[in-house]
Image (cartoon, rainbow, N blue to C red):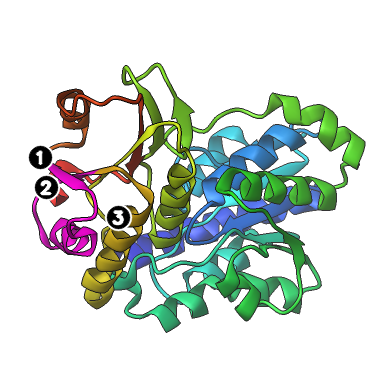
Amino acid sequence: MDLRVVRDWLYGQWIAWRIADFHSRGGKVVMITGSYGKTSVRELAYDLLRQKYRVVATSRNYNTAVGIAKTIRWELMQDTQWLIVEVGAYRVGEIAQFAGWIRPEIGVISGIARQHLTRFGSWEQIKRAKTELAKYIQARGGILVANGSDETVRELIKEAVWYEGIEREEVNRAGAREIARVCGMSDEEIKQREKHWRSIPSRFEITAERYGMAVIDDSYNSNEKSFKEAVEYLGKQINCTRIVVTPGLLELGRESEGIHLELGKLMARWSDYVILVGKNERTQAMAKGIGKAVKVVWIQKTMEFMEAVKQLQLKKEPLVLIENDIPEELS
């Protein structure tokens, strides 16, 4: 028997007990899941809601049974009104199981992408898993908030409170606004409190200080869709020398070569230089997709990009997109 499954089930029973007590006091739960965007939407929604309500949200990457239990144990108070829970999953049935423990009044689907294909087994299994929250909410008369800019979500979800946008930050902020609305905030209250939004580290964070040059830091937990969105955004910054730094994406299974080939073609279209981290099947597939369209530079570790950019002797100031970061032992 998988010990992780047993451990999570035991934590889940404790979570269910504490959530039942929370609901008995009038507390309500927002559950957020998806292949991408869920942490950003969670943080932005928290920034809005905390200006009006007593709210607790899971933090960092606490989206497993253990992490959620820690948040409930140490942060949920007697006067908490809203609990925002981010939930991750690696197999079919996990999201439904979490929903049964957490019993959310509001469910949020932030996006569906071909992420963790190795663990799920197929794209169809991912789509099945990521829509479990929608089925739970709809069966119990709750409110479902969903990213209408994601074509897969639109295809699979028939009825929801939709949010949309063009660029990633716009989409995530739209999601946070819709969550705030269904939680009872007025448009005027939301507008007044948007000034309190914080930047979220390493999630499309634009900085000109940390690395000694202008950088779009998107190094945390990338996936195929967010990768494409980030590269297309970079491509529009025509007043800069556009540089992508990436080691590629993990856990794409049998589709890895094809996806990385397509990402290479995309970078060839929207960038001036590509810096590939490590020589492996991922980066070699991207290099094949890039071809001779733009110059490719090879480095061993992500942070070596700073010296690599300096050596390019550019005429225009660089704008560097760091797309994903992979632990050295997995690169």
Q: Which mark is residue 268?
A: 3
Q: Quadrant of residue 170?
A: top right
Under mark 1, the amino acid is Gln
User: Can residue 51 be seen from the camera position used here?
Assistant: no
Instruction: Say left or right for 97 vs 184.
Output: left
Could you tell which of marks 2 and 1 lies nearer the N-terminus?
2
Above-or-below relation of 35 to 198: below
Residue projecting furthest to the bottom: 124
SS at badge 1: loop
Q: Would you call the spot at circle 3 few (<14 residues within 10 Å), some (14-19), or many (20 or more)?
A: many
Residue underneath mark 2: 278
Q: CA distance from mark 3 to mark 2?
A: 19 Å
Relative to residue 271, is residue 74 drawn left or right? right
Q: Residue at x 65, y 38 (%)?
A: 44
Mark 1 to mark 3 CA distance (whole Å)? 21 Å
Amino acid type for the residue under numbered disc 2: Gly
- Residue 7, image x, y percentages: 37, 60
Of marks 1 and 3, the one in the foreground: 3
In-front residue for pair 231/217: 231
